[in-house]
Image (cartoon, rainbow, N blue to C red):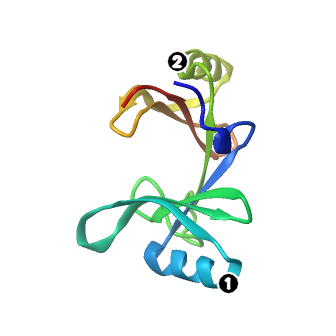
């Protein structure tokens, strides 16, 4: 599969918030955002959603481990990057000193994904599209 056009050449921020459904409503009203995708979890929580704000994609979800809410001293923003070969990039990043948080694995939403933490504390999720 090819990287979707709206993900090409972009580092996509993924914010973790308290009350993602309310945040989406706010972004629609305040910024004219449109909801692109939503994966609901238990108890009304949003595991993952994507919105478009003036043509730019923003990912968001309700904060839960290993992520935290803003101000809690943990990671509240994760950076997503679609790449041609997630396995090769993961190996390269680990060799350069990144901490492997999750090895490359096929995900049910049609991507092979890994998660790493850079030496400065930022969490990166790298993905390669695959057939779902």
109 to 129, vertically: above or below: below
Rendered residue at 48%/81% (across/down): 22
Could you tell me residue 103's position as x and y percent?
Answer: 43, 26
Could you tell me residue 70's position as x and y percent?
Answer: 58, 70
Asked whether 112 or 116 is in front, the reply is 112
Could you tell me residue 21's position as x and y percent?
Answer: 44, 76
129 to 70, vertically: above or below: above
Quarter residue 98 falls in: top right
Q: Residues within 10 Å of mark 2 (few under 14, many from 20)?
A: some
Q: Nearer the viewer, mark 1 or mark 2?
A: 1
Rendered residue at 58%/83% (across/down): 26
Rendered residue at 65%/25% (across/down): 97
- Residue position for label 1: 30
34 to 59, vertically: above or below: below
Q: Residues within 10 Å of mark 1 (few under 14, many from 20)?
A: few
Q: Earlier in the sequence, mark 1 or mark 2?
A: 1
């Amino acid at each position: 599969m090819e990287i979707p056009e709206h993900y090409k050449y972009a580092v996509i921020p993924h914010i973790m918030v308290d009350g993602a459904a309310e945040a989406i409503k706010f972004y629609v009203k305040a910024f004219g955002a449109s909801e692109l995708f939503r994966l609901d979890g238990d108890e009304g929580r949003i595991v993952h959603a994507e919105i478009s704000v003036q043509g730019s994609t923003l990912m968001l979800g309700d904060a839960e481990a290993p992520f935290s809410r803003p101000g809690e001293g943990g990671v509240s923003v994760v950076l997503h990057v679609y790449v041609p070969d997630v396995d090769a990039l993961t190996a390269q990043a680990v060799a350069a000193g990144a901490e492997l948080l999750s090895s490359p694995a096929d995900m049910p939403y049609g991507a092979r994904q890994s998660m790493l933490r850079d030496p400065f504390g930022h969490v990166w999720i790298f993905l390669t599209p695959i057939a779902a």
